[in-house]
Structure formats: C-alpha cells, structure tokens
Amino acid sequence: MLKEFRADLHIHTCLSPCGDLKMSPRGVVKEAAGKGIDLIAICDHNSSENVEAFIKASQGKGVTVLPGMEVTSKEEVHIVALFDRIEDAVGLQALIYENLEGENDEKAFGMQVVVNSEGEVLGFNKRLLIGATALSVENIVDAVHSFNGLAIAAHIDREGFGIIGQLGFIPPGLELDALEISPRLSFEEAGVRFGEYHEYPLLCSSDAHYLDDIGKGTTTFLLEEASLKELRMALKREGEREIRSPKYETNSNDQNKKSETI
C-alpha cells in the first residue's frame, strides 16, 4: 500500500569539515525522528565513511538512512549521490579518493571526524574533503549510475557550488535524476526560475550542517516503503509513486545563518 514519506535527502555529519561536531549518529537520527522525517540521506563531502554508523544508529528509531555523498566536480559543482547499499557508496568513495588531492587543514576548514554508531571518535580523515575532485560533472554522474545510484544536482538556486551558478546552465544530455533546491527558495519560485529544466524532477532538502537545520527543507513522496528503489520510481512517476510536495520551514533568521554553507 502506498503512503506518504517525508524525506530530507541531504544531511552532513561531523565528517564534513564544515559540519558541526554535534552532527553525530544519535543526534541526527533523534532530530529527524522528532521532526517527523521518515527518510534521510547522509551526504558528507567526498566521503561516505560515516554512513554505516548512521545506519546502525537509526535501527528501531523510525527513520530510514540512505547511504549518500556530496561530490565536488573539477568545475566545483556539487552532485548529491544516493545509494541503496553501503557497498555502492564505498565503491564511489574509492573512485573519489583516487581523484582527490590535498590534505585537510583543521584550523582553516574544521575537523573531519569519523565516528561509530555511539558517536565515539574512531579517527580523523586527513584528506581535503572540502576540495574539488579531478572528475568532471559528466564523469561523476556516470560514476554514480555505474554504482546503481541516483545523481542529483545540489542546491541549484545557489551561486556557489550549484551547477547553474558554476557552469551557467545544465549541460544538454546530462543524465541527472533530479534537481535539488535549498529551503531559501519556494517551490513556486523555483518553477518560474528554472522552468526551462522542467524535464528534471525537483526536490528540496536541508543540506543541514547543524542539528537545528535538519528538516528545514524536505520533500514528501508517495511510496510503498522508504527505499532507493521506491524513490527512483517516484522520480520517474512509475507505479503510482510520485513526488507529493516539497515543504519549507524558513524564517528571516535562517537566511542569515550560514547562508552560504559549503
């Protein structure tokens, strides 16, 4: 039987250098559950090392966690990758690490903390996760699909790291599965502003780097269950699955707080 699932498909953790250290497995899952969110995706910058811990922490909490990653292309475009299996996210991560140079400067960018499901520190990722890979946007989208994932252009309404802001347009024939807008833009405004790209499904996610930001932007889907397979069907409007509506919870303070979060 089909039912509505509220999803926030772009959430960072303490592994992202710009993510708050309170973005721990228990903290994120508790916050999502408390806000009535059924499905979240963990999408740290250029890494999926914290995904397994968050999936374990979500067991029995009423929140499904999808493996994900926010990959930065050589053009400095952010692409959100979503997967069904941890193994697929790890496969993409291996490719990303092969094409990511540099070492993190904790004083400049922040710590990159790897944790277990209890939030205990296992180590610190020393790679420059905030950096750009040597892969083009097309390379990344193709790679995500090769690992059976969904490729979504992140926060297209932002100048920084949004595909339109960086390239000026969405390359014809780029096989994106959806476009993401941030909570700062209403769905109606997005329809007008990006009407030329109406062939792509439009989603809203929070891109949360702080606990309070989780759920600030969500999308409601009509699905049979909270899974990547069902999301894929909804994006294609198959089997009566569909995107019901993005939902926005913003106020004037939200626009001023970390408005250009990386």
Image (tube, grey):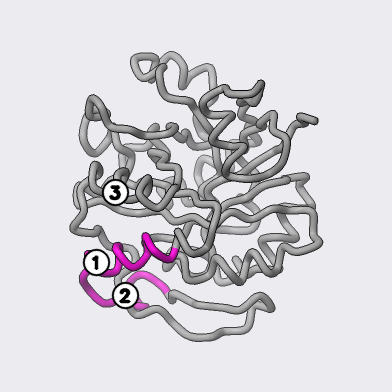
Q: Residue at x 45, y 59 (%)?
A: 88
Lateral position of residue 90 relative to residue 212, left or right: left
Q: Earlier in the sequence, mark 1 or mark 2?
A: 1
Residue 176 figure quarter: top left
Front one among 219 and 2: 2
Quadrant in which residue 102 is drawn: bottom left
Q: As displayed, is residue 51 above or below residue 150? A: below
Percent coordinates x, y for residue 84 in the rendering = 55, 52
Prevailing SS of the magenta stretch: helix
Q: Amino acid at mark 3?
A: Ile
Measured Cα–Cα span from mark 1 to mark 2: 8 Å
Q: Which of the marked residues, 3 or 2, is nearer the chain's N terminus?
A: 2
Dot 2 amino acid type: Arg
Q: Residue visible at 54% across and 64% down?
A: 13
Say whether marks 3 and 2 touch (CB < 8 Å): no
State how far apart marks 3 and 1 are (Cα).
13 Å
Q: Residue at x 52, y 32 (%)?
A: 203
Q: Is residue 64 above or below residue 215?
A: below
Q: Secondary structure at mark 2?
A: loop
User: Where in the figure is residue 128, as x and y percent of width and height?
Assistant: 30, 71
Instruction: Check disc 3 and report the residue beneath it.
Output: 140
Q: Secondary structure at mark 1?
A: loop
In this figure, which residue is indicated by the disc labeled 2? 127
Q: Which residues are magenta?
A: 90-110
Quarter of the figure that contains the N terminus: top right
Of residues 55 and 205, the one nearer the viewer is 55
